Image (cartoon, rainbow, N blue to C red):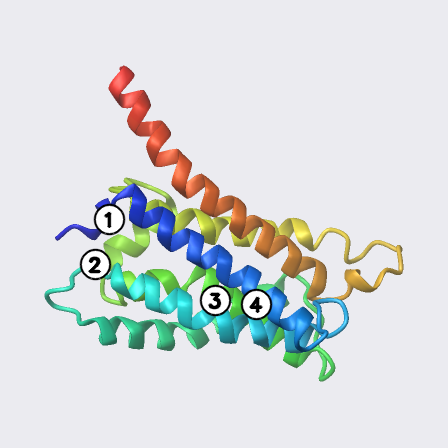
Amino acid sequence: MENRSVPISTAVEVQSICVLGIALSYWISHVFFESTFVSDPVRTLGLFLIVEGPLLIALYSFLRDDPQKCSYWKAVGRGLLGLPLGALINAFGAIVLGAPLGLMYWKKTINWSLLMSLFTFVPATCVFGWSSKENWQRLVQYSKMTGRLDYMLSFPAYGAIVGGWFGAFPMPLDWERAWQEWPICVTYGVIAGYFLGILISLVLPVARKSSIKID
């Protein structure tokens, strides 16, 4: 079965649950722990991981590329393994681009990197695993997208990365606002970009299909 051609209804359901998971994470952190990204970024990021992580891994494991050869639980295992590996890549990238070093920041950087891994790296590891170089190359280079699932994996990830980059712009400015601290404004940008990427991943395949029919 070619899972990259998932129905639009499945795509909407999966992405809607991911969005609701983020909303639920924020609600739980705010209502039960009186925690926000500004007041306690470490705890809030941790709660986001606890709530959103299992949801996202469970959903994308159902969309694994070859269910005949890869069981559901094997896909879950790939996602769990991909979470810390992706976090290492994201942490390295953030530090290279100027994220602060020091003991006071390491918990923030770890939790932020894990959340970024969840948005960018984990879905593809659940679906494709590690051995499919062609699939990873296609997603990274945004080339020869073969179905709706490719868009679901690619655009939210790129949205989170670009959103985090834009979110970092206020950090060096001399506004003396609490939300300018690492990684608060970056995280807001990541989540906004992730939401936008989800929207694009749902709309673009439909728009392209319509344009092909018109041609």
Q: Which corner quadrant of the image does residue 60 belong to?
A: bottom left
Q: Is residue 113 left or right of residue 2?
A: right
Q: Which residue is mark 2?
A: 65
Q: Gap between marks 1 and 2, in whole Å?
A: 7 Å
**Secondary structure beneath disc 1?**
helix
Q: Is residue 160 left or right of residue 38?
A: left
Q: Which residue is mark 4?
A: 25
Q: Which residue is mark 3?
A: 117
Q: Amino acid at mark 1?
A: Arg
**Secondary structure beneath disc 2?**
loop
| Figure check: 157 above or below 27 | above
Q: Earlier in the sequence, mark 2 or mark 4?
A: 4
Q: Callout 2 environment at 10 Å: few (<14), some (14 to 19), or many (20+)?
A: many
**Secondary structure beneath disc 4?**
helix
Q: Are marks 1 and 2 in contact (CB under 8 Å)?
A: yes
Point out the residue furthest to the bottom here: 103
Which residue lies at the image location 89% right of the left edge and 60% below the top edge?
A: 176
